[in-house]
Amino acid sequence: MTVMIDTSAVPAPHRVEFWAKHSCDAYHPLHIGTDGTDRFWARMWADRLGPVGLYRIAAGPNTMRRTPKDILAGDPECLHVQIVLRGRLHGAQQHRATALNPGDITSYDTSYPAIFRADAPFDLL
């Protein structure tokens, strides 16, 4: 896999904004938030397997939100399947919520609002 986004390329105070902008470019419109902008870090690797995009994300604590406004701004109309490799994620979409641990698999539909939160560093594919 090829490194697609690496926040170590920018000064710490600008990493959350950098990550959010480039994540939108790679995936779809979304919002990224974190409590500790000076300590935030993230990296994304990417590859293609025929028509399937494959991404690996390792990052510090953050929250990813996909709002109705984001969906109107751009919707690839796809299903994202995620496998948690390290850490713990909390996810919610369409009145469903889950806590994900290493080895757990989940999905979200880009056509509906969603939120994923990590309170500690995590790694997912």
Image (tube, grey):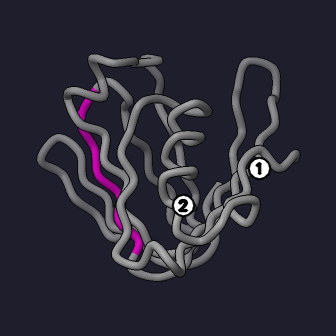
49 left or right, relative to 84: right
Where is residue 123, by image quadrant?
bottom right
Q: Residue at x 70, y 26 (%)?
A: 52
Q: From the image, which quarter does the C terminus lie in?
A: bottom right
| Dominant SS in magenta | strand
Mark 2 or 1: the one toward you = 2
- Spatial separation of the CA atoms under disc 2 and disc 1: 20 Å
Q: Position of residue 35 (x, y in %)?
A: 34, 76
The residue beneath circle 1 is 45
The residue beneath circle 2 is 14
33 left or right, relative to 83: left
Q: Residue at x 72, y 39 (%)?
A: 54
Closest to the observer: 16 or 1? 16
Residue 29 painted magenta: no
Q: Of label 2 and label 1, which has the lower sequence position?
A: 2
Q: Is residue 34 above or below residue 64?
A: below
Q: Residue at x 44, y 52 (%)?
A: 106
Please report the bounds of the magenta region as a residue range: 112-118
* Count of numbered circles on the image: 2
Q: Position of residue 77 (x, y in %)?
A: 42, 17
79 left or right, relative to 85: left
Q: Residues within 10 Å of mark 2 (few under 14, many from 20)?
A: some
The secondary structure type at the circle numbered 2 is: helix
46 left or right, relative to 68: right
The secondary structure type at the circle numbered 1 is: strand
> Given the image, on which type of amino acid does mark 1 rest?
Trp
Q: Which mark is residue 124?
A: none
Q: Residue at x 28, y 63 (%)?
A: 98
Where is residue 14, by image quadrant?
bottom right
